[in-house]
Image (cartoon, helix red, strand yellow):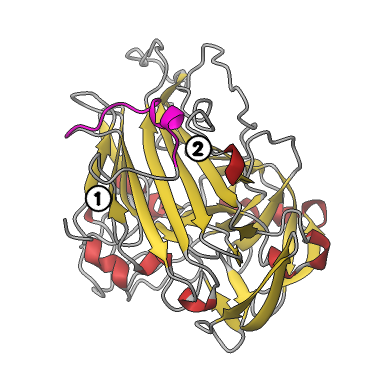
Amino acid sequence: MSEFEPILLTLPSLAPSLAVEIIPYGLTFHRIFVQADGRTHDIVIGPEDPRGHITQKYTNTIIGRYANRVPVGTHAIERNGVKAEVIAKLNEGTRVSLHGGPIGFDSLAWTHLTPNLPPTLFTEAELAHLPPLSSAATYGIFRLVSPDGDQGYPGELTTEVLIALVPPAEQERKYLEKGQTAAGAEWDLGSIVYVYRAKLDKGVTPVNLTQHWGFNLEASLKDGKDTLSVKNHHITMKADRIVARDADSLNTGKFINVSDATEHLHEGQKIGDKYPKLGYDDYYAFTPQKIKIPKRFPVSEFTPKFDLLEDVLIPSGTGGVTRGDRPEPVVELSSETSGLKLIFETNQDGAMFYSNAWADPTKGARKKIHGGSGIKDHGDGYVPGTAAFLEFHDILAAFLDPAKQNGNDTLLTSNEVYHNYVRCDVRFRQPAT
């Protein structure tokens, strides 16, 4: 299979409410299809041609080994007495190693696993929650092996990623009657789940993975410039601080309280209400809550009965379905115009919110379903403010902070397994007329 040939995952239905196209190159969410109210939406921006991701970088791809920005140079690292060195390589400006280095996980072909090539980082108990693979798959598991020294990072790192669609619980759907003008009831369309697992062969290495996906819940309406912008989307982020960064966007080790910078206080308002001059490109640290799902666990616990997937794969619904050990949602993104809402939960400490502020419409391509020609460098690409990128990961360059040593330091030793998950519940409310 070509690394650019889309792999379709879909909920089991003649007209599925939720489907995604994954391309192995960069483990990319090429399309996320949502069907509601007789319309088909593709809720992520990006190129029409899967090969467009080669140059239209960081558009719905995985990021690794290390998300965001790290200062270039040699860094000594240590976790639980295990020591190594990272040689962060330059690929932005004069001081910055961005998104894992010049050839990050976003630029590599991932292997789609099969029954003949099964996963090794998901247990028998966890795989039992997934249906048998068929031509109409609801999930896929992918693998990448990063060799020792890759982009300056020590140790051979094996990463496996589960991407799954979870159907909603049974529920009654009521559409508006003719003449009704109020918004209809909200219901669940299903959930998108990704789970990152990683294992190191020896020593210690930094690991901080994320999905660099950019959402637009109105672009498929193709109803003028307003629906191409996300400034009318409503956003809630349960965050109390943003990371203070320097002129090269490197972490200074300090925070800014959102109460002191109210443009970063997102409590359901429109993104455009207090839109900064240069748009949004900030890391939000979530308000602390007790999270029972670990970010790493000892290899000694990784037995056939070990299971961190059961609760994560519970169908969403309005009928009081238990959350189990899952934390409360931390981000909501919604559109009154399309009626779509995304609700995110994770075991990560925060998220980058980027409003596509540096987009250049003369470069790249815009999808035809979003009103573009789909032709690269045709002059009708995405403009600034056309996406809400929500990248869930731990604190920027945390392994350089002595205060985090042996704690939440984003380091992984060979006697641990990395575990990072994000769940996105997709909902719909028929818009008011």
Label at residue 202: none
Give the camera-side residue of 16 and 115: 115
Q: Residues within 10 Å of mark 2 (few under 14, many from 20)?
A: many
Label at residue 423: 2
| Residue 398 locus on image (x, y percent) | 70, 64
Q: Amino acid at mark 2?
A: Arg
The N terminus: image quadrant: bottom left
For mark 1, what is the residue?
369
350 relative position to 115: left or right: right
Q: With respect to residue 45, does 290 lie above or below?
A: above
**Residue placed at 81% from the left, 67% from the top?**
402
Q: Which residues are magenta?
A: 122-135
131 relative position to 79: left or right: left
Report helix, strand or loop for mark 1.
helix
Q: Residues within 10 Å of mark 1 (few under 14, many from 20)?
A: some
Q: Is 128 one of the magenta-colored residues?
A: yes
The C terminus: image quadrant: top left
